[in-house]
Amino acid sequence: MEGRDILKFMAQQAKNRLRGKDKNLRPNVKTIDVKDDEKLYCIVKKTVDDNCINPLAELIDIKYYKTLSSDQKERYFFNLADKYRELKQRYEHEKLKQVN
């Protein structure tokens, strides 16, 4: 394969993983449950109030992250980013309720 073909192939694999079409999904990727949501919510509130530059660095479980393969790291990171966005919106909505 040429360099361009390899890049195209790798991009297609990443796209399939993000869409959930990867046939080799590994079950040991950590999912975030309700208990973790509340812990993360407290961290999200702190990062938003402190104007944190890199809030995902505050949320990530480094010990766990280091044990993952590159595919699993990607999935974990995007899952965490989605959860951060969701919890940040929740916090901002609750702050607006308090103001009104």
Image (tube, grey):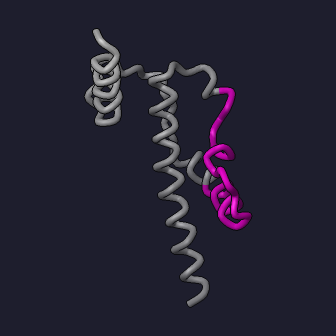
Image coordinates of residue 74 in percent, x first then y, are 47, 31
Q: Does the magenta segment cover residue 43?
A: yes
Residue at figure coordinates x 69%, y 63% from the top left: 51
Q: Nearer the viewer, residue 12 or 89?
A: 12
Examine the rendered structure and indicate whether residue 6 appears above or below residue 17: above
Q: Is residue 9 above or below residue 34?
A: above
41 and 70: which is toward the camera: 70
Magenta stretch secondary structure, dominant: helix
Q: Nearer the viewer, residue 41 or 58?
A: 58
**Image quadrant containing the C terminus:** bottom right
Question: Which region shows up in magenta?
Answer: 41-63
> Which part of the image, by quadrant, shows the N terminus?
top left
Residue 49, quarter of the rendered image: bottom right
Name which residue lies at 55% across and 62% down. 88
Residue projecting furthest to the right: 50
Residue 77 placement, left or right of 11: right
The residue positioned 42% from the left and 22% from the top of the image is 27
Q: For residue 18, which quarter of the picture? A: top left
Picture coordinates of residue 92, whole percent (x, y): 55, 72
Q: Is residue 44 magenta?
A: yes
Task: Provide residue 41's location: percent of width, then percent of height.
Answer: 61, 57
Q: Residue at x 52, y 37 (%)?
A: 77
Left or right: 84 with respect to 64? left
